[in-house]
Image (cartoon, rainbow, N blue to C red):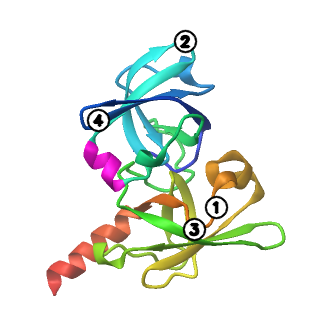
Amino acid sequence: MFTGIIETLGIVKKIEKEQENVHFTIQTDITNELKVDQSVAHNGVCLTVVDIFENNYKVTAIKETLDKTNLGFLEIDTEVNIERAMKLGDRLDGHIVQGHVDQTGICTEIKDAEGSTYFTFSYDPNFSNITIEKGSVTINGVSLTVVNSTKNTFSVAIIPYTLSNTIFKNLKKGDIVNLEFDVIGKYVARLQELRN
């Protein structure tokens, strides 16, 4: 379980393909605090630490993860958002995030708003995921509040701190992002489907 509050940034140092799996070697300033078997979210994708050496650690993504997320687009020296799993008893500063990406979306617009930055995203509505005004959504692992929600688009407003301390600072129009929709909203939508 995660909160969507990014702890630090990691840098991809090595990418190794092994059959259909891909091993990512990540360098962070918290590597010395990690342990093998620990769950860490990378751009919102929960992956297990399988090895630690010096200030690097390794995680493995299976084909399904690569197909459903933007991890397959990572390159050497790419920055990723990093969050360790939440400790029981910690404050839930973001919202309940599972680290299971529902689908990807595309950044369609970036607009400066005199102090904050608005990012607009579109996504395939055939997956039955929804957003609501003032609801929560996770983009590349970052817990955010939805504004301007439509059937398959929504916007978020990013404050300067979040912009400079996450990979939002590198995001460009046309980039693919990981989307995890609010788990409570998903249960409500599923219950509604079962009633119809």
**Secondary structure under badge 3?**
strand
The magenta stretch spans residue 67: yes
Residue on which disc 4 sits: 21
In the rendered view, would you say 65 is above or below 52? below
Measure the C-alpha gap from mark 4 to mark 1: 28 Å
Q: Quadrant of the N terminus?
A: top left
**Secondary structure under badge 4?**
strand
Q: Looking at this view, is 100 or 21 the one in front?
A: 21
Q: Which mark is residue 147?
A: none
**Secondary structure under badge 1?**
loop
The amino acid beneath tag 1 is Lys
The magenta stretch spans residue 112: no
Residue 183 lies in quadrant: bottom left
Which contiguous range is marked in magenta?
A: 63-68
Measure the C-alpha gap from mark 3 to mark 4: 33 Å
Residue on which disc 1 sits: 172
Q: Main secondary structure of the magenta part?
A: helix
Q: Quadrant of the C terminus?
A: bottom left
Residue 13 lies in quadrant: top right
In the rendered view, would you say 196 is above or below 22? below
Residue on which disc 3 sits: 145
**Residue 175, horizontal then vertical, whole percent:** 55, 61
User: What residue sits 37% from the left and 50% below the top?
Assistant: 98
The amino acid beneath tag 4 is Asn
The amino acid beneath tag 2 is Glu
User: What residue sits 15% from the left and 79% below the top?
Assistant: 194
Disc 1 crowd, CA 10 A, few/some/many (<14, 14-19, 20+): some
**Secondary structure under badge 2?**
loop
